[in-house]
Image: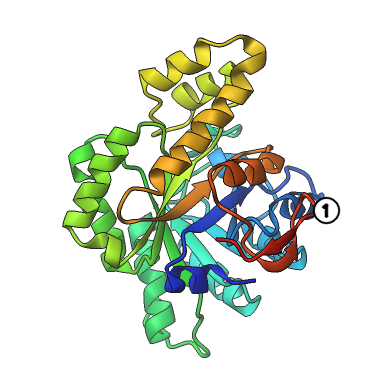
Amino acid sequence: MTGLREALRAGRFVVTAEIEPPRGADRDAIGRSARLLRGWVDAANITDNPSAHVRISSMAGSVLAMNAGIEPVMQLTCRDRNRIGLQSDLLGAAALGIPNVLLLTGDHPCFGDQPDAKAVFDLDGVQLVWAARTLREHGRLLSGRVVKPRPDWLIGAVENPFAPPTAFRAARLGKKVAAGAEFVQTQFVFDLPMFERWMARVRDLGLDTRCAVLAGVGPIRSLRALEHLRHRIPGVHVPEEVDRRLRGVPAERVASEGMDICVETVRRLREIPGVAGVHVMAFGYERGVPEILRRAGLGPRLIGATTTDGARSAGRR
């Protein structure tokens, strides 16, 4: 594998995707998703109890992903652990050879299926990024204690260009970059003009040269999914134009129209200065990721590898 770190260092247009660990103790579920993505992405996020729903841990899922031949990005949220647990998991990830971590505050338990669960939030996402950087570069825990050997993962964060107040979102990314974020994955991009304005501010601050921006994309495959995104997922902005397109076709064509919109979005994102790649979120529809990438002009990631459609990759980027 080229590796996410090396792909970013080489300046290639990077592709990451997302794998949700199973709700039950199914050790083969990660492998099934990984086989659909293998050869098409530089790395895949293993989510950490997304939307405050209990699933297999992101650390276990990351190990299973590596066993299935795909490079993981281990997500770690502040919602469920205090600083002791967070630093312990960061060290555990390094000991297991997990090469990338994505650090975020996390959704409140009220959004999940156990809304009475006690939220921790001992640290927030920016503080956790800083703690990870301190641990990696100085070999020190937040207590000041020295640890050896130091971990060496790539540090990522998340950002939402569409959350109000939008005028401060680029500056907020600046805080994460200053704390140590080397790449950032954004919330779903459906409103391209709004995203372009955010990217202009990111470039004005010089953040695109210090942190790789991976724009979040994904297909809306049903009107039910559209409603879920608009009303149940915090921070997602679906403009009226996209809403009209999806509601303006027969029900049996909504999935196809959603794929078209996603492909068009990826193509336009590739033309925006400062965008280093895309992060494809196709929950439960990993088999559609190669089609999105192929139609958007993004070839397989692995040189000489067999992709999910059985073809041999010639190392196209």
Q: Nearer the viewer, residue 228 or 23?
A: 228
Q: Is residue 66 left or right of residue 272?
A: right
- Judge by depth and name the residue closer to the eye, 147 or 178: 178
Residue 142, image x and y in percent?
A: 38, 75
Q: x, y percentage for residue 46? A: 61, 55
In the picture, residue 41 is in which quadrant? Answer: bottom right
The residue sitting at 70% across, 62% down in the picture is 313
Viewer-proximal residue among 250 and 55: 250
Left or right: 263 with respect to 67?
left
- Where residue 236 appears, x then y in whole percent? 41, 32
Residue type at mark 1 is Asp
In the displayed orientation, state which residue is furthest to the front. Answer: 314
Taking the spot 61% from the left edge, 62% from the top edge, the residue there is 301
Number of numbered discs on residues: 1
Q: Which residue is mark 1?
A: 28
- Residue at image position (31%, 56%) is 274
Residue 182 location, quadrant? bottom left
Work out whether residue 84 or residue 95 is closer to the camera in this orientation and state it.
Answer: 95
Quick one: quadrant of the N terminus?
Answer: bottom right
- In this picture, is 291 found above or below 302? above
Q: Secondary structure at mark 1?
A: loop
**x then y, percent, for residue 170:** 24, 50
Which residue is pictured at 64% across the width and 55% down the height? Answer: 40
Quarter holding the C terminus is: bottom right
Residue 146 in view: yes
Visible residue check, residue 48: no
